[in-house]
Image (tube, rainbow, N blue to C red):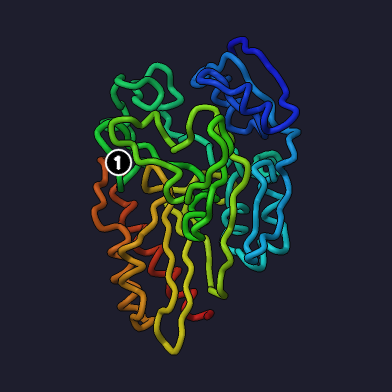
Amino acid sequence: MREFAYVRAEDVAEAVELAGPQVRYLAGGTNLFDLMREEVERPERVVDISRLPLAAVDDLPDSGLRLGALARNAHVAADDRVRHRYPVLARALLKGASPQLRNRATIGGNLLQRTRCRYFYDLTAACNKRTPGAGCDALAGFNRGHAILGASSSCVAVHPSDMCVALAALDATVNLTGPEGERSVPVTDFHLLPGETPHVETVLRSGELVTSVDLPPWPPVSGDYVKVRDRASYAFALISAAVLLRVEEGRVAVARIALGGVAHKPWRAYAAEELLIGAAADEAAFARAAEEAVAGARPLEHNAFKAEMARRLVRRTLMDLARSS
């Protein structure tokens, strides 16, 4: 690990003032320290924000919920309001990482964690995300875990977060503070597809700090987060899905589908949702929606199985939710 300057911010305003192009915020450190140890990240200065008052989980006036950026993943997953009103989020958090990591990782850090593409971490490999213009060894390499949707010739990495898939299905909002003031961004717009600039992963501007994530008020729906991975104890998703469903008089009234492990960002399947609204809540409709959820998939040499796995996961989850609703 290379030398860097360390400073602890006393409040949000100071943290923003201390930020800059070669500066990284430090909260739980569960991803940043790995990146610094491997020299993928080489910040000149690290600003410790771990003691800022951003760890609360608060009710919002509209009956939504605000998750502080420094709230621990384990704490949020155990919060009764999250468990009862947003169970899909609690389940996603509990299926991410190990208990030790969940006790340390934060909501803001989870939102900003970087891809686990092996070529991104291998400094001897060509990687446009790590070094713009270098090329992408994953395209012709071992790409079993890589993207099948929304990728480009510059990057086929996938976003690793379980939590963000659930937040995408919930239509959560990310709150930011920066040199230009405060603003809010829908989480579905927060992460970017790679295009020709895969190193630009979010809409964050220079110096901006994630302060919280808002969950909107949500009518009663059935929901689940399901994840397929190589080992049950601790692994990133090959495919995951956050699915919300409400059935009224045999027809679909509400449907939300977001996929993980398939793209550079959590992949919201809007067209599949549209197919479902008003349709009979039966196996045929769910199969059509599952097919639509991965329409346009472009598998690589080693990950053609992902499209079929995603279809089966979405269809099965919709069936299970319909039976329980």
Q: Residue at x 38, y 27 (%)?
A: 129
Q: Quadrant of residue 64?
A: bottom right
From the viewer's perspective, tell me whether residue 61 is left or right of residue 199: right
The answer to whether one can see residue 150 in this image is yes
* 307 lies above or below 191: below
Q: Residue furthest bottom?
A: 249
From the viewer's perspective, tell me whether residue 43 is left or right of residue 292: right
Instruction: Give x and y (percent) for residue 23.
Output: 57, 20
Quadrant in which the N terminus is drawn? top right
Q: Is residue 235 or residue 181 the one in the foreground?
A: 181
Q: Residue at x 49, y 74 (%)?
A: 321
How many numbered marks does the figure carry? 1
Q: Give the SS element for disc 1.
A: loop
Instruction: Give x and y (percent) for residue 235.
Output: 53, 44
Residue type highlighted by circle 1? Ala
Where does label 1 land, which residue? 151
Q: Is residue 236 or residue 172 the one in the foreground?
A: 172
Q: Residue furthest front?
A: 180
Q: Residue at x 37, y 45 (%)?
A: 263
Q: Quadrant of residue 89?
A: bottom right
Near mark 1 (Cα within 10 A), the count class, few <14, some 14-19 or many ≥20, is many
